Amino acid sequence: MKHTKDLFSLEGKVAIVTGGRGLYGGPISTGLCEMGATVVIASRNVMACDAYAKKLRDQSYRAIGLPLDLSDDESIKNLVKDVHKCYGKIDILVNNAVDRQNMTSLQNATRMKLQDSASVNLNGQILLSQAVLDYMIPAESGCIINISSIRGLDSPHFPFYPETMGDQAVNYTTEKWAMVGLTKYMAGRYGKHHIRVNCIAPGGFNPGLSDNPDTKKFVDTYIANTPLGRWANEDDIKGPVAFLASEAANYITGATLVMDGGWTIW
């Protein structure tokens, strides 16, 4: 029986975090590094990834930045091959990246917008998981964590949104629900290879909205209707991901861990 502290350690693990320097990705990458993992921060903006990785290395953590375009099959294959060539394994994949450029209301939706959005936010996640599983399956080990949202569990509560925020994106809600389904599918299919697949459903986490007069009312309403009475912070997102990536969660798979301050209990 291992000591509990050892169960939570990620020492020696190699992790890929897509969108690993953004709003959610930054804390996730930092949290995995703090627990001992080597983290590959991947997105289309490789300069930003490099800069964030350097920031982590300056704190004596192990991190690198690599390019990844989830809408490009070759980019996906090249990232996974490069990581495996460099480190000899891939232990953890965090499917965190999200492209918001093609978010659209139902009334304004076009086939092109929906296809371009799903190409990254759903199909890209599936194909990246496929590429990583090609190495995890022979190793008979691995952990995939999908980042969904409370939008993957419910629907936008439209009365809370002021007109200044516009209509809520139909494809965001649809894609985030799909991530929960993808989690269950992969957990069921690859559990026999000792590969765990879980999901995080974060609640409100966007500090910039509180500073904007057009969105502050929404934030205040959201907080007032959240049982814990506050907006999420960086520690709230990195803790659950580090837990699910660790051996402390070795008997957890196919689960969606809800991190929303209690929002979805109402």
Image (cartoon, grey):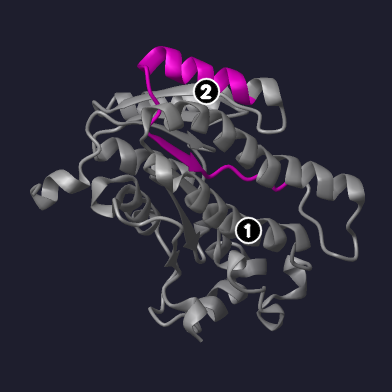
Question: Could you tell me if residue 122 is visible in this image?
Answer: yes
| Vertical position of residue 227 compared to residue 257: above or below | below
> How many neighbours does mark 1 have within 10 angstroms: few (below 14), some (14-19), or many (20 or more)?
many
> How many neighbours does mark 2 have within 10 angstroms: few (below 14), some (14-19), or many (20 or more)?
many
For the residue marked with disc 2, what is the amino acid?
Val
Image x and y of residue 121, in percent: 67, 46
Q: Which mark is residue 176?
A: 1
Question: Could you tell me if residue 143 is visible in this image?
Answer: no
Q: Which mark is residue 201?
A: none
In this picture, which residue range is highlighted in magenta? Answer: 76-101
Image x and y of residue 88, in percent: 37, 17
- Please state if 49 lies on the left or on the right of 1 as rendered: right
Find the distance from the CA under tag 2 to the CA under tag 1. Answer: 24 Å
Front residue of 221 and 259: 259
Picture residue at 77% right of the left edge, 73% below the top: 163
Q: Residue furthest front?
A: 192
Front residue of 148 and 206: 148
Picture residue at 41% right of the left edge, 39% below the top: 193
| Vertical position of residue 52 compared to residue 234: above or below | above
Q: Is residue 94 magenta?
A: yes
**Along the polypeptide, which appears first: circle 2 or circle 1?**
2
- Please state if 166 lies on the left or on the right of 124 as rendered: right
Residue at the disc numbered 2? 80
Image x and y of residue 81, in percent: 52, 17
Front residue of 140 and 117: 140
Q: Residue furthest bottom?
A: 266
For the residue marked with disc 1, what is the amino acid?
Lys
Q: How many marks?
A: 2
Dot 2: element: helix
